[in-house]
Image: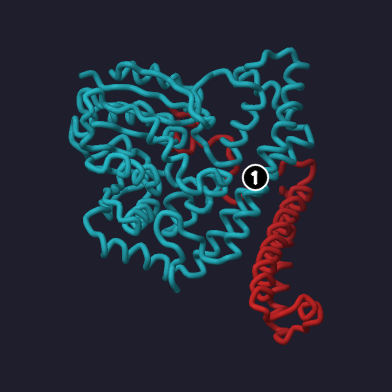
Chain colours: A cyan, B red
Amino acid sequence: MEQRNPGKHPQPPRREDASHMDYMTEVRNFAIRSWFPEIAGEVGGIAAQAGMPAGISADEYAQLAPEIDRSPAVAGWKRLMRSQQQLAWQKLQDSYAADREFWEGQLTEAEERNPGRLHYDPDFQVPESACEDIHLQPGGYCGDNLAGFVFYHGTRVFYQGDNDRDEIHEACVDDMRLPADGQVRRILDLGCSIGQCTTVLKDRHPQAEVWGLDVALPMLRYAHMRATDMGVDVHFQQALAENMQHADDSFDAVLAYILFHEVPEHTFEPIVREMLRVLRPGGTLTVIDTPNSTVFPTPNWMWKVFDARYNCEPYSQAFGALDFAALLDKVGFEDVRKETTNTFLLNTLATKPG
Amino acid sequence: MNSKHDELSRAQVDRAGLPGPGEEPHFLPHPVMDRLLEAVIVLGGELWIERDRRRALESLLHSKGLVTPEEIETHSETDAQDRQQELTALVTRLLDPLRTMRADG
């Protein structure tokens, strides 16, 4: 069995998988683009009737939640969102598992063809917090050797077709802050997942040594296979973000794309301190993640709480409530700034003092 | 020092409020409604998969001059067993959410 269109934009195993992904993308489009605006109107109305302001706190949302959850529309929307996610993952996972030996062979073959670019210790202990079925993907990032294959196609559905050519990862890299002196010799993609930002970083900075670091070996193995097929020379490493195994002052720039909302609260500060340690003086940090605020519109709270509890993002609310910019200031970063992006995500930029 | 939380791992504390392993929450007034909606989503997916494949197949056949629409209309299946297996698999996928439903949803 030949892998169809290997490399940057592979196809899923069967035509029916692609058809199913198209269908699930449309289901998600319906839920988010057509239905959610109506839900938001209803939820906002409930808040207004209760005399709440446009932006409310978590405690205020908790007061409103019982009435919001009694809405048939809200209940149906939650069911649709959760079932769409579950069914999309499951079909992809079943399809890859049907030819497990072949797909695992693809990963192994890439490691033999391109040695020295995938770094891991077989005795590495994955923390319990990284073993969640994150976003409801069965087995999460760490529990299935084929998780990277499934994740790639599943997130194409998640991005609703807007990232089929890594457009969002390209935008993230283009939004990065870079050192004022223009020296970019080593770059770190922290929480690199399947390496989509990692390969874009190498495209944008071909002279630099680029590292992607993640806790999940199945994702890193897929990232390595993908980069190998693309002919992009980057390194992938299994490590904890709070213990990167890199020297002090060894990176010119660090990017962390949607990492923090998926890690436990007690790791926020250790990770930030580790990023500061590995950056060289004048080195720059770019963190693109869910917005940090204690106040959100009521419909946003409804979605955030749903994601945390029912889309298996258990740590996302703790990061949302964190004053992340203040944390960066506290550990010693300077020139900390927040910028909006073209998506719902927030870009936080900082520099290590020179 | 002896509170329940002290005995829990950090990850377990952070997971408070999430469904446990194997638990499926229900959002609608009765768990059956959740399962029926899931069945409808599955059915829609199966319908689109088949429609998409048929479109591709009929387009190819027609463009190659191999089969006319009339011949498709009047064709009878030769491998009845294979067809029956596909149908059984479809119904299983469609109705399994109901079969696997537990009392607590």
Quadrant housing the C terminus of chain A: top left
Going 52% across and 32% down the picture, which residue do you hit? A343
What x and y, as percent, mark residue B86?
69, 74
Q: Is residue A132 above or below residue A350?
A: below
Q: Provide the chain ID for the residue under circle 1.
A: A
Going 44% across and 49% down the picture, which residue do you hit? A141
Q: Say what amino acid the circle numbered 1 marks.
A: Arg
Going 41% across and 59% down the picture, which residue do you hit? A145
Residue situated in front as seen by the camera: B83 or A341: A341
Residue situated in front as seen by the camera: B57 or A270: B57
Q: In this view, does B8 lie above or below B47?
A: above
Q: Quadrant of residue B66?
A: bottom right
Q: What element carries label 1?
A: helix
Quadrant housing the N terminus of chain A: bottom left
Q: How many marks?
A: 1
Q: Is A57 left, or right, of A166 in this rendering?
A: right
Residue situated in front as seen by the camera: A246 or A255: A255
Is residue A137 shown to the viewer in this render?
yes
Going 72% across and 73% down the picture, which residue do you hit? B88
Residue situated in front as seen by the camera: A23 or B30: A23
Q: In this view, does A200 lie above or below A285?
A: below
What x and y, as percent, mark residue A30?
69, 43
What x and y, as percent, mark residue B84?
73, 78
Q: Label 1, on which residue?
A: A28
Give neighbour class at mark 1: few <14, some 14-19, many 20+ (Cα, 10 Å).
Answer: many
What x and y, as percent, mark residue A264?
43, 34
Q: Quadrant of residue B70?
A: bottom right
